[in-house]
Amino acid sequence: MNNSRHIIITGFMGSGKTTIGRGLARILRCEMLDLDHVIAEREGRTAGEIIEQDGEQSFREVETRILQEVLGNSPRGVIALGGGAWTLERNRNLINKHGCVTVWLDAPFELCWERILLSGSSRPLARDEGQARMLYAERRPQYALAKLPIRLVANRSTDEISAEIAERLPALDN
């Protein structure tokens, strides 16, 4: 794998972006950043708090600004995006401009929803199952633009999924 490129992990909330990203970074022996965590550190508020207090549009502007900083200033590694970051064309253009490899964790809605409920955290853009299901359906066409789709099923371990991604990355360098 070309270590000069960031590997971007995208997918719906609850798909396992942060967990899989950590596992992949461990295999590749590189840094891993969770964009929502970086935003929270820099802004002093979580993504959910920013959305609740300032609105989604304001959050998306912060998200794009910090994504640009991370892509330009961080050592090459794995970056787990928030669920909506990849859905914005300006973010996809930024990611593509930096030559990143993009991985879509294609998890079934039911698995994502189960994980959302288990996390117990408030999701301002998915307050109930109906709202989450609509958002999931809206975002799938953008997620499908990623270079490497990884179909997830409930019984696969994080290690298995991370290993599959690591094995498939070299083919994307051609």
Image (cartoon, rainbow, N blue to C red):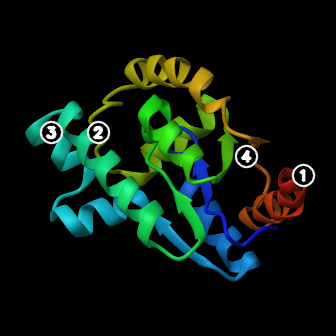
The mark nearer the N terminus, 3 or 2, is 3
Amino acid type at circle 3 is: Glu
Question: Which disc is residue 60 wearing?
Answer: 2
The residue indicated by pointer 4 is 154
How far apart are labels 4 and 2 at the CA level? Answer: 30 Å
The residue indicated by pointer 1 is 174
Q: Is residue 137 left or right of residue 37?
A: right
In front of the other: label 1 or label 3? 1
Q: Is residue 56 left or right of residue 119?
A: left
Amino acid type at circle 4 is: Ala
Relative height, residue 41 to residue 99 (above, below):
below
Give neighbour class at mark 1: few <14, some 14-19, many 20+ (Cα, 10 Å): few
In front of the other: label 3 or label 2? 2
The residue indicated by pointer 3 is 52
Q: Is residue 172 left or right of residue 44?
A: right
The mark nearer the N terminus, 4 or 2, is 2
Q: Residue at x 54, y 72 (%)?
A: 32
Amino acid type at circle 2 is: Arg
